[in-house]
Image (spheres, rainbow, N blue to C red):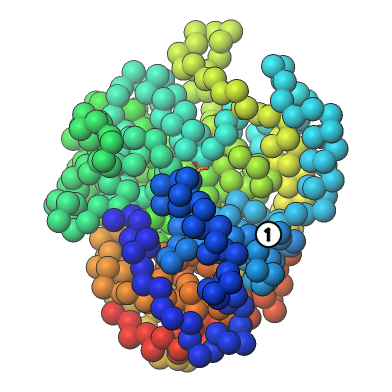
Amino acid sequence: MRYSFLSMSHPPESAASAKLATSYRSAHSRSRELYKRAAAVMPGGNTRHSIAMAPYPIYAASASGCRVTDVEGDERIDFLNNYTSLILGHADPQVTTAVQRRVALGTAFTMPAPEDVELAELLAARIPYVDQIRFCNSGSEAVMLAIKAARAFTGRHKIAKFEGAYHGIYDYVEVSEGPTADEWGEADAPRSVTEPGTPPSVAADVVILPWNRLEACRELIARHSKDLAAILVDPMPLGIGMIQPREGFLEFLREETAHHGILLVADEVLNFRISYHGAAHAFGIEPDLASFGKIIGGGFPVGAVGGSRRVMSVFDHTGSLKVHHGGTFNANPVTMTAGLETMRQMTPEAFDRLNGLGDYIRDRLTRMFHDSGVPAQVCGRGSMFVAHLTSGELVDYRSLRGFSRTSPAYGNLCHEMLQRGMIISPRGVFGCLSTPMREPEADAFVDALDDSIGQLGIQPA
Ligand SMILES: Cc1ncc(COP(=O)(O)O)c(C=O)c1O
């Protein structure tokens, strides 16, 4: 079900499209031609389901700042930023220069390089709950390492995660990342729904918690407490529509885990872009471990696991090593250089300015929906936003699925936005900002959305 966007409808170009950027749908489209070749040699024509789009994707040629030019020569403003990973936008001049210099000096060694020490020092200095850190090549790996560390540290084997939350492609965290109503079971005790290809035994080791339902969580945690190594929580999960944690919910998780000797693992792969000091810090909690990725690699493949010295000692080969951690390209100097340059530019002031623009666009979106009479709720925080086209109460994954299943509009909306020169997700009105953006880009986005909704005559649930 999580790939529902694959079957989204692909409408004919609308009347408005003539004056907008739509050459990728034309008879001579290079994207169409590239996709035909891709589909012959890659199943589904891609190697990453999150960029699949019907009838075929738009192929990128180049990008600069907040604008991407496709292979037809059409330019769009990028409100996805490689799914939030490009906080400085594309081809930032300082990052580009630093990386070019580094590439000319060699890109990978069977030795460490100074840049990984510097990036580790920078992150440890900024994030209050990170004494030590280790790098890997993706957010999925970072989450996997955090879970292995928690198991090794506690000597327990189960983990708990939230229904609907996405944490990458490790078997255990894929459980119930997008269950359907006929799969998900009781609201107070959700079933563990595994992906095809996952051994059924995995389901028995993953406890599924309902987001924001404190009493149900308390009961489930207590029931499994003796076996639980970790509770994995993204403080504002995109898979749950960035519905904010209710007041006291994250604090409750912190207290409950401490009480039962369970580690609290914050997945900040996506949400680290909220704050200079880390997402969990911004939400007022101190996890035992955290996973990072996306922005800390400055546009290159990256992941990292960090936490208290005591817990991170499970990776220490000079002590009583418990978790082996290999990876040919871990902490490669190119990624480390790009990450360092990016994080140095992301000063507290840079975060404040970007997050201020986030407040601006969320406010403008809320007013636009109000003025156009479309019942909608705008979620998100920092430099990210999600607009839900419903007036229903948003609490957890199930409240979200209730209306999004019946809303056929999102795929078409994405196409309408592409035609108006805006890149957003085909899976909902989700977007994020980058530092090259200013109010005019945010205004252009809101106006394009207003226009698109009008064009489609959306009747919200
Ligand atoms: C919260 C969260 N965790 C983990 C991941 C996995 O990261 P990656 O795609 O780098 O493996 C993602 C990716 O979007 C994510 O959003």
Choose top left, top right, bottom left or bottom right for residue 356: bottom right
Residue under the point 74% across and 61% down:
64
Choose top left, top right, bottom left or bottom right for residue 98: top right
Residue under the point 68% across and 46% down:
298
Quadrant that contains the C terminus: bottom left
Q: How many marks?
A: 1
Give the amino acid at mark 1.
Answer: Ala
Q: Is residue 379 left or right of residue 461?
A: right
User: Is residue 42 visible in this depiction of the protein?
Assistant: yes
Q: Secondary structure at mark 1?
A: strand
Q: Is residue 350 left or right of residue 55?
A: right
Residue under the point 61% across and 83% down:
20
Residue sitting nearer the eye, 321 or 69: 69
Choose top left, top right, bottom left or bottom right for residue 102: top right
Q: Is residue 109 above or below residue 159?
A: above
Residue sitting nearer the eye, 185 or 141: 141
Q: Which residue is mark 1?
A: 61
Residue 397, image x and y in percent?
Answer: 30, 58
Q: Is residue 217 left or right of residue 7?
A: left
Q: Is residue 48 above or below residue 358?
A: above
Residue under the point 80% across and 48% down:
96
Residue sitting nearer the eye, 102 or 252: 102
Quadrant that contains the N terminus: bottom left
Residue 403, image x and y in percent?
Answer: 28, 71
User: Is residue 285 visible in this depiction of the protein?
Assistant: no
Residue sitting nearer the eye, 226 or 19: 19
Residue 411, image x and y in percent?
Answer: 41, 71
Residue 127, image x and y in percent?
Answer: 62, 40
